[in-house]
Amino acid sequence: MPYVNIRITREGATAEQKAELIDGVTRLLQTVLGKNPATTFVIIDEVDTDNWGIAGEAVTVLRARARGG
């Protein structure tokens, strides 16, 4: 019973994109590991960029700097 947790920043991923991720990961586990899709769980967590840090800074700050702000 595979459990896959995908975490992405909350920046407008559409329902269609999330559905594609869920389907793709499920099919990958079936193809590579022979896992049953009926018992494969895929969870997508969306995290605000203020709550996601890289190299000691929030993604919000890093992106603002990259935009020149």
Image (cartoon, rainbow, N blue to C red):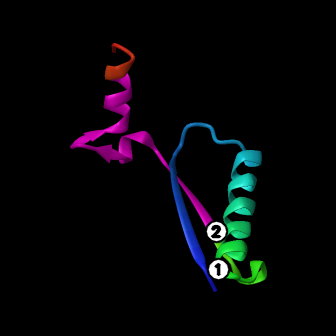
| Residue drawn at 64 percent across, 42 percent down | 13
- Helix, strand or loop status at disc 2: strand
User: Which of 23/15 is in front?
Assistant: 23
Q: How many marks?
A: 2
- Vertical placement of 7 versus 41: above or below? above
* Residue 52 in the image, given as x and y percentages of width and height: 37, 47
Viewed as shown, does residue 54 lie left or right of 18? left
Magenta region: 43-64
Which of the image's four quarters has the C terminus? top left
Which one is closest to the eye, mark 2 or mark 1? 1
Residue at point 65%, 74% (across, down)? 32
**At x 70% / y 82%, what residue is drawn?**
34
Q: Which mark is residue 33?
A: 1
> How far across and down, in percent of the image, does residue 49 sit?
42, 40
Query: CA gap, disc 2 to disc 1?
Result: 15 Å
Amino acid on which disc 2 is placed: Val
Q: Is residue 40 above or below residue 15?
A: below
The residue positioned farthest toward the left in the image shown: 56
Q: Is residue 46 above or below residue 66?
A: below
